[in-house]
Image (spheres, helix red, strand yellow):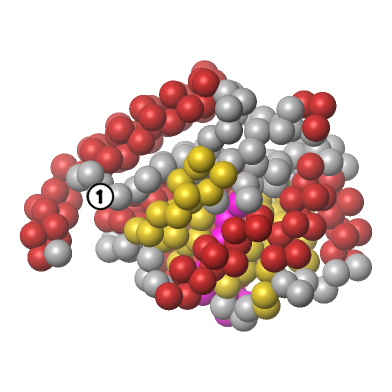
Amino acid sequence: MPTASTTHLVLIPSFNPGRAVYETVAEALRSWSPVWVVVDGSTDGTAEGLVTMARHNPDLTVIVEPRNRGKGAAVLSGLARARAHGYTHALCMDSDGQHPAALIPAFMQASVAHPGAMILGVPVFPANAPRARVYGRRISNLFTNIETLGRHIGDSLFGFRVYPVEPLLRIMNAHRSMRRFDFDPEAAVRLFWEGAAVYNIEAPVCYPRKAEGGVSHFHYVRDNLLLIGMHIRLLLGLLIRIPRLLGGARRT
């Protein structure tokens, strides 16, 4: 039986993930209840399939957005509804089978023990992990370490995480960024700036082949430019926060 909670939910943003989404959702449901899926304007027929799944499983809620607005926007939509239903924390995971649903309970238990913290997955890469992704995230992690003065964010781009809902909503509503692929790194940095503690847990990551239903919506030029702009914005934001952050470091 899945672990049921009235405070912690699984939130899965989904855009044209192909058939992999059904097994991803089924695995999440085997580990946790409730599971919410935010369909971000998918056109591949998975919205209809997920709605059908939800009709047969009361632990699954499917929110269908009419048009694609980006991962962060889908998460924001889910977070707002989660808060309205009394949920305080959300574990976000991808819909394409990359993230280990079996570790959902462990991440949720860490969040219950540390409710003010972010519980961040640190990816353990398989041998077939795309080299461009592995090396590219090292660059993003380097900048994230600078933006947090070297404080403990193990991986800036891995989207298997538990967030406290209220502070993340407050941050996202105050900024027009964090709506697309820039969501994961900027959310972690800004939550850290607001005082959220960080707990890192290693988690294996899987890269399904196309024959296995693997899908990627990462556009190397567009999304890398988005990340470059995000890091410039965060580095500028760091300058005005350095005295406070250093003061916090001395106190701890």
Left or right of 225, for residue 76: right
On the question of residue 176 being in view, the answer is no
- Residue 52 on image: x %, y %: 91, 59
Residue highlighted by disc 1: 151
Observer-nearest of 164 and 101: 101
The residue at the point 38 percent across, 59 percent down is 199
- Residue 15 on image: x %, y %: 71, 41
Observer-nearest of 140 and 131: 131
On the question of residue 155 being in view, the answer is yes
Left or right of 40, for residue 173: left
Observer-nearest of 91 and 73: 91
The boundaries of the magenta stretch are 83-93
Quadrant hosting residue 174: bottom left
Quadrant containing the N terminus is bottom right
Residue 87 colored in magenta in the image: yes
The residue at the point 70 percent across, 43 percent down is 97
User: In terms of secondary structure, where does tag 1 sit?
Assistant: loop
- Residue 228 on image: x %, y %: 38, 27
The residue at the point 75 percent across, 64 percent down is 29
Left or right of 211, for residue 240: left
Question: Badge 1, how many Cα within 10 Å: few under 14, some, many 20+?
Answer: some
Residue 197 colored in magenta in the image: no
The residue at the point 82 percent across, 27 percent down is 211
